[in-house]
Amino acid sequence: MAEPLPMTLRLYQTLSSAVVPFAPALINRRLKKGKEDPARVQERRGMSEDVRPQGPLVWIHGASVGEVLAAAALVERLRALDIRILLTSGTVTSAAMVAKRFPADIIHQYVPYDSPRYVARFLDHWRPGLALFIESDLWPNLILSSAARRLPMVLINGRMSHRSFPRWRRVTATISALLSRFDICLAQSELDAERFAALGSRNVVTTGNLKLDVPAPPADPAKLDRLLAMTRGRPIIVAASTHPGEENILLEAHRRLARFFPSLLSVIVPRHPHRGEAIARTVAAARLHGALRSREELPSATTDVYVADTMGELGLFYRLAPIVFMGGSLIEHGGQNPIEAIKLGASIVHGPHVFNFSDIYDALDSAGGARQADTVEMLVKQLGQLLADGAARESSVAAAAEVVGKLGGALDRTLAALEPYLLQLRFEMGAANA
C-alpha cells in the first residue's frame, strides 16, 4: 500500500484542480506571447484529434528541445523493434524540431497542463504501456496519476543540477513521493545518481549521458552549398545557442578580432529564434553590418555578423565554420551541449558557466578538446589562436572526438536497463496478434 502523500502534494492537487476554470486565460496569455500553437491548444487540456495506434505504445516525455533531442537515438532503436512512440514536450520550438528532425510516424503531443482532469484525459486517450521521463521534468499530477494506473515509469538520462538539488533537499518528502513512483532512475553521472538516491529514488543506475550518443544534426545540401559559395575564403566563427547578455560580448570580440582578420564573419545562432530582430538591432547599434536569416538574407562580402534566427539549422552552421563558441556559458545559464558541434568537426570555445554539462566540459578542457574563456580578452585570445593556427584546430578536434568516444555508450546501457520492460511490451504485442 502506497504511503500517504505529503501535505505539499495534496495541496498541489487541490489547487491544480481549482485553477482549471482559469486555463483559458492562461492559454490566451501564452498565445499572445507565441508560447502556444493556436491549432493545438486542445492538447494542453489532454484532448487530441490524433488516433491512438494499435498495439503497445511507449510514451517519452521531455521538457523542450534539448531533452527531446537527447532521446533521438533511443527513439530510432525503439522504432526498429516495431514499437510505436508517443513523444510529448512543452514548447513550440520543441514541437517544430520534432516535425523537422523525427520520422513522420512519431506521434508528437504537447504535454497537458498538470491538472488531474487534463492528465486523466491524456492517459485515458493514449493508454501507454511504458513511460520514459527525460532528465528531470517532474510534473506531480502526471507522475501520481500514471503511478495510480500502474503504468511503469522510468526516469532516463536523469540529471539533478547543482541548483535544483539544494532546493529539493528542503522539501525531501515531496520529491521523494514523486521519485519513489519511478521503477528505476537512469542517471547521467555518479553525482546525479547520488543526488537522486538522496532525494528518494528507490533504484538508481548510472548509464551515462544520452546527449553524447546523439547523431550529428542534418543539413540541407543545397543551402550549405549556397552558404559556402557566399562565404568562401572568409574566416568564420559560429556562436551557437546564445542567450541575452552574451551577444554584446561576442560583438566586442568580433570587433577586436577583425583588426587581425579583416574579412571575419561571425554567425550568431540565438537559442531562441524570436530574438533575431533584437539581436540585429544590437548589431546595428554596434556599427557592424548585419544580415538576418529569417528575412531570407544571405551574408554578403560586407556582412560582419550573420544572425541565423531560424529553427533546426545548427547542423548547417556547424558545417560552415571550423570554430564554434557554445552559448549559455558567458552568463549563468549553465552552458549548452557541445557534442553535435564536435561530431561535425568544430573546435570548441566556451565561457566559465557550464555547470549543466560540467562532466563533459571538464573532460574536454583537460584533454585540450575545448577552451575556456572567462572574459572578452580571453575570448579574443582563444578564438584568435584557433583562427590563426590550423594545426591547433585539428589537434582540438581530434582530442574532442576522442573524449566523446570514451564517454559515449549511454544509449546501449539505457536500452539494457529498459530491456525487461520492452520484453513485456513485445510479449503483449505477440499476444495481441495471436
Image (cartoon, rainbow, N blue to C red):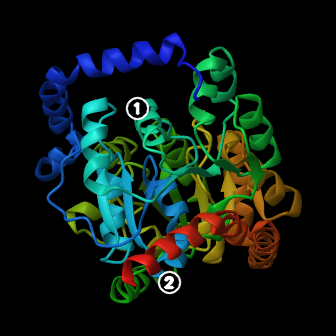
Res 159 label: none
Where the N terminus falls, by quadrant?
A: top right
Figure check: 92 above or below 171: below
Q: Is residue 397 visible?
A: yes
| Mark 2: amino acid | Ala
Q: Is residue 157 left or right of residue 123?
A: right
Q: Is residue 364 left or right of residue 168?
A: right
Q: Position of residue 243 (x, y in %)?
A: 47, 42
Where the C terminus falls, by quadrant?
A: bottom left
Residue drawn at point x = 77 percent, y = 29 percent: 198
Q: Is residue 195 left or right of residue 131?
A: right
Q: CA distance from mark 2 to mark 1?
A: 32 Å
Q: Position of residue 322 (x, y in %)?
A: 61, 74
Q: Position of residue 97 (x, y in %)?
A: 36, 63
- On the image, numbered disc 1 is attached to which residue? 141
Q: Residues within 10 Å of mark 1 (few under 14, many from 20)?
A: many
Figure check: 311 above or below 374: below
- On the image, numbered disc 2 is attached to which residue? 80
